[in-house]
Amino acid sequence: MSTKDRKLIEKENRRESILAAAETVMTTHGIHGLSIDLIANETQLAKGTIYLYFKSKEEILSILSMKARKLLFKEFQKIEKSDATPIEQLKDLIKENYAFYKKEPLYYDLVSLYEVNNTLTETEEMHESGQEIADLIIKIAVRAKEEGTLNPNINPLYFSFCIWGMTVGVFQLIKVRGALMNEKMNVSEEDLLNTFLETFENGIKK
Amino acid sequence: MSTKDRKLIEKENRRESILAAAETVMTTHGIHGLSIDLIANETQLAKGTIYLYFKSKEEILSILSMKARKLLFKEFQKIEKSDATPIEQLKDLIKENYAFYKKEPLYYDLVSLYEVNNTLTETEEMHESGQEIADLIIKIAVRAKEEGTLNPNINPLYFSFCIWGMTVGVFQLIKVRGALMNEKMNVSEEDLLNTFLETFENGIKK
Amino acid sequence: MSTKDRKLIEKENRRESILAAAETVMTTHGIHGLSIDLIANETQLAKGTIYLYFKSKEEILSILSMKARKLLFKEFQKIEKSDATPIEQLKDLIKENYAFYKKEPLYYDLVSLYEVNNTLTETEEMHESGQEIADLIIKIAVRAKEEGTLNPNINPLYFSFCIWGMTVGVFQLIKVRGALMNEKMNVSEEDLLNTFLETFENGIKK
Amino acid sequence: MSTKDRKLIEKENRRESILAAAETVMTTHGIHGLSIDLIANETQLAKGTIYLYFKSKEEILSILSMKARKLLFKEFQKIEKSDATPIEQLKDLIKENYAFYKKEPLYYDLVSLYEVNNTLTETEEMHESGQEIADLIIKIAVRAKEEGTLNPNINPLYFSFCIWGMTVGVFQLIKVRGALMNEKMNVSEEDLLNTFLETFENGIKK
DNA sequence: CATGAATGAGCGTTCATTCAT
DNA sequence: AATGAATGAACGCTCATTCAT
């Protein structure tokens, strides 16, 4: 291993520890509570040092958003490798997304941050992490089509964007309005999820 | 017209001009870039004067958000009163929502602002303006059910939340990623919209 | 009664109603919570009108401070007219001052405000209201001296300032630190008052 | 001396220079005229820099108040260690307090600041610096009692509060009204002080 | 005499970023 | 490479006072 490599690895380690600190901070202070000061505290690094590894606070956020996607992707992969039918798998993706939102609210917010905040600009790497998820959905959709269980008019590429957007939108609604809807209109999260699943299933089946 | 009336009208005009300035500011600086200072600059008023007409920055935002909701609602009402079948009307709502997003991007963001930013708290009035839209969708869904063209398992109440969440989610995706998707994957917005519409239609039909 | 007189009386009435409003405001918002806005609200007058009757917020405060002194003076007068010996009367003045502080915290604060805030400048009228109290104390002290019960070295004029300063200081201490002293050191307000009274009595007796 | 030590000393110097600037500002603008802006101007530092050294304006005030208390305490200590009798020492405390008020009017105000302004909350450290003074007075009072020269009915604890309150009250009166009293009534500050001292001496003697 | 809209300096505080060491 | 002191614009908001009507 060359000195140059070692340097690169060390640099990567520092990056990782800064990102880990940022997560810790966000877990206690919320996404909007993230600040360079708090990251510096958490890492025991100087404020200026953070800027040697990341060009801005925004970059840190973007990368964590990407990491969240990768986590979600891993869960999605398990589903894709299961024995369930493609249609069942697609529904499982939505269910898993819901579970993820419940289990890892921070990561879920980070996934959405990306979708929501237009001041963030995607790097190539980030784009790829998003693409992984899309590709996986496309793969399942293609299988369903081959099997003959998916509506033949549906283009799997477009379809994968659709399912992603729809799902994010419905959960965002649940997140922000779920409590209020439950209180004022007696709407339960689970039933809403089921309605979505059913609509979705009908929508894609042949 | 009495002096008192004139005063009230003048006051209302000032409010309107401040709101208009806020819109102008947001158009150039984004929703998060709105500040009292910039509004004051834009209106050529002193900072303190803004507070004679609105009690806080949040009030300004909430009023504009409400205005946006009402604008969208008006467009939705036209659809609800049209001769189209309920199913067609539901699809038209989505198409109109898309058109609204294209024509009035700022207003479109303002509609969703409260769906997205949890540091803001909805007033009763705000809630109502959101409810109007939901009620209208429910009304159409109920008609479709009575007609027998809607999947009988679907509860119109839950359904209205679903369609809203799905639609917002898909357009948000288009907004943030549309350009990139188009460039990199040759995915056209229109086709994505059509895929969504088709999935949706299949999803809700009996 | 001439027109000029009527005008003066009307003007005085307005002044009184503004002062009354200021008191009401302070009762709910505290001395530091007093603002011209709140007075205008309370009086149903325009903000600018307040400035026709008083040249500044400070003037209003000064006058109310004076009024508080007059109230205290009235209570003091009752004591001076009582049958008690001069020495007893002097002690009664201190007790009454304590009672006043307990019963009318706002007025008590206003009396002290005057003594404490060096940005206020006394008008002739205000000076007189302070002098009334001083004169009354002097009067009692002179009687005590004539009776032979007061230390013959003490000049009644100086003495009256002394008793006032001492008393205000001790009660101020009780007000600000009473609760803390009670908690941390088990010092009771009553015992402190009694210690003061005893010290005082010994101090002035022949 | 290590680099770390040097850094600490530099930091302390900066703190001191900010505190000195705050004093300068207060000397010209009064205690209530102190503002972060003016301190920044005076120090030629950026506003934000002040907050690197002090967490709030209140912290600056409380430190200066403590400093003033400690200064006064030092003078009091000299008296306590003198050869004078306890009774003489107590009188000397009052005289020294008067001298302090004359020599260092700003510090004198700062000592009382927390006695007067109830929007400020004392820290433990602040409380202690006040307690030091109280304890010293108690110590002298106890000696006087042991010697048999203090009125045996007087509890030294209560007594220490009394002397403090009385003294502060009388000097406050002198401060605010001294000039006026002199002009209008030919009352000299010195004679007033002497009257207070004599009353006090009689009051505490056996 | 009365109004009340308008002012604008002022407040304490925050924080991403820079740069001399 | 690492530091961390320093920056300074920005934030939302307040309020005594003025002045044209």
Image (cartoon, coloured by chain):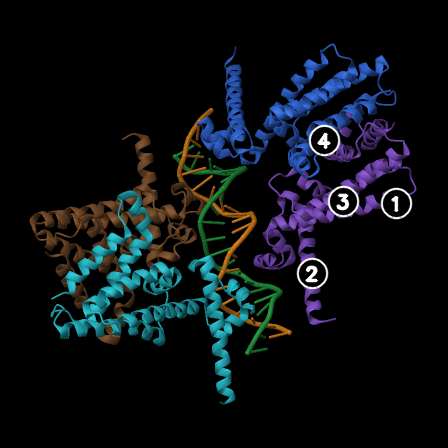
Chain colours: A cyan, B brown, C blue, D purple, E orange, F green
Quote the CA–CA distance across marks 4 and 3.
19 Å
Q: Residue under mark 1: which chain is it in?
A: D
The circle on residue C54 is none
Q: Residues within 10 Å of mark 3 (few under 14, many from 20)?
A: some
Judged left or right of residue A121, residue D150 is right
Judged left or right of residue A192, residue C53 is right
Query: Is residue C192 visible to the viewer in this orientation of the structure?
Result: yes
Quote the CA–CA distance across marks 1 and 4.
27 Å
Q: Residue under mark 2: which chain is it in?
A: D
Q: Which comes before the other along the chain, label 2 or label 1?
A: 2
The kind of residue tagged 3 is Glu
Question: Which corner quadrant holds the C terminus of chain B?
Answer: bottom left
Classify residue C103 by image quadrant.
Answer: top right
* Residue marked by disc 3: D132
Q: Nearer the viewer, mark 3 or mark 2?
A: 3
Furthest-bottom residue in this view: A2
Q: Residue under mark 4: which chain is it in?
A: C
